[in-house]
Amino acid sequence: MSLANNFRMMSRYNQRINAQLMESCLALPQAILEKETHSFFPNIISYWNHILFGDLILIGRLALNDVGKLSPQDLSLFPAPKSPQDIYYRNLSDIAVLRKQVDELIMQYCINLTEEDCKKFITYKTTEGVSITKAVADITQHLFNHQTHHRGQLTCVLSQFGVDYGCMDLPVIVSEGSYS
């Protein structure tokens, strides 16, 4: 399997699972969305904002290096990520709109991503100001791993609140696999 095909599959999974989880969260009252979770982030709203932070900062790093036909202009209408604790919105409906737009941008990035792009190295500064050089494939993998990591924490919180968010298995969510 090519890396580019794998990333296309992961972008479909990302888009679909985010929509599925968001639907579950949108059904919750605001009091539950803001309830202290005693977990990595203080509440459900903070989880969604942090996942967006990770997506926006990583996509921004790729856009600055003209990877996958991304450009800084593609991000001009999105909030500028500054800190892992960024709160873009406190209202989940507003977060849902932004989440959908970011997922569409990630899909377009992965559709345009080539095997040659995956082999490129780019240099960027972390939020702490440290300069790092990484392969585009590694950064793209981290984009999806970061989401998966924090969605796992979010689903644990949702489970503790008694929310049934459905099946999250990759072969079910992206039944067509990586070659479609």
Image (spheres, helix red, strand yellow):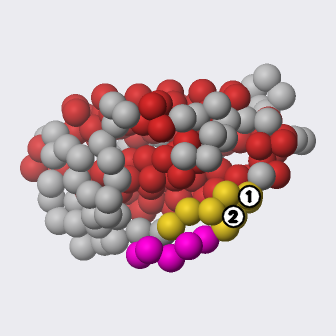
Residue 49 at x, y = what percent?
A: 30, 51
Residue 180 at x, y = what percent?
A: 79, 23
Q: Are marks 2 and 1 in contact (CB under 8 Å)?
A: yes
Q: Is residue 128 above or below residue 84?
A: below
According to the picture, the residue beneath numbered tag 2 turns out to be 134
Q: Is residue 171 visible?
A: no
Q: Please give the range of residues in magenta.
A: 128-132
Disc 2, SS: strand
Seen as rendered, the residue at the extreme left is 31
Q: Quadrant of the N terminus?
A: top right
Q: Amino acid at mark 1?
A: Phe
Residue 13 at x, y = what percent?
A: 60, 37
According to the picture, the residue beneath numbered tag 1 turns out to be 121
Q: CA distance from mark 2 to mark 1?
A: 5 Å
> Counting other residues with Cα less than 10 Å from the Cα at mark 1, is it few (<14), some (14-19), or many (20 or more)?
some
At 43% from the left and 47% from the top, the residue drawn is 56
Q: Is residue 170 visible?
A: yes
Q: Mark 2 or mark 1, which has the lower sequence index?
A: 1
Question: Does 130 lie within the magenta span?
Answer: yes
